[in-house]
Image (tube, rainbow, N blue to C red):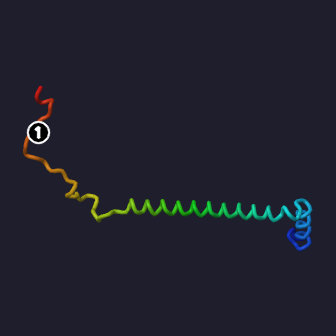
Amino acid sequence: MGDLFSGPHIILIVLVVLLLFGGKKIPELMRGLGRGIREFKDAKDNVSREIEDHMNDDRKTTSPTSPTSPGSTNNSTAKTTSTSPTTSPADHN
């Protein structure tokens, strides 16, 4: 048993396709096949681009903006205590 895609086999397949679909229908089928392959490639590229964009966004949001150690406190967010007493509405009852 020979190779399935040898010269005579390919010629036979082309002749059968030509007989089944006719000379006018084959270019339409090939255009449709080309469009389908192009759309698949575009969709694949879009998915890859979106994945890369999200990975880049995650890297930007997780990277620290200033080098601080976990045990240190940031003075801009530290709370200050006031010396004046505060009263709440519940204290007046």
The residue positioned farthest toward the bottom in the image shown: 7
Q: Is residue 48 left or right of residue 71?
A: right
Which residue is identified by label 1?
86
Toward the viewer: 20 or 24?
24
Circle 1 Cα neighbour tier, 10 Å, few/some/many (<14 / 14–19 / ≥20):
few
Q: Quadrant of residue 44?
A: bottom right
How many labels were placed on the picture? 1
- Residue drawn where x is 59% and y is 64% of the image: 45
Q: Is residue 16 left or right of residue 93?
A: right
The residue positioned farthest toward the front in the image shown: 24
- Residue drawn where x is 7% and y is 43% of the image: 84
Toward the viewer: 42 or 66?
42
**Which element carries disc 1, helix, strand or loop?**
loop
Q: Quadrant of residue 21?
A: bottom right
- The percent position of residue 59, horizontal first and vertical second, equals 42, 62
- The percent position of residue 36, horizontal first and vertical second, equals 71, 60
Q: Is residue 78 left or right of residue 11?
A: left
Q: Amino acid at mark 1?
A: Thr
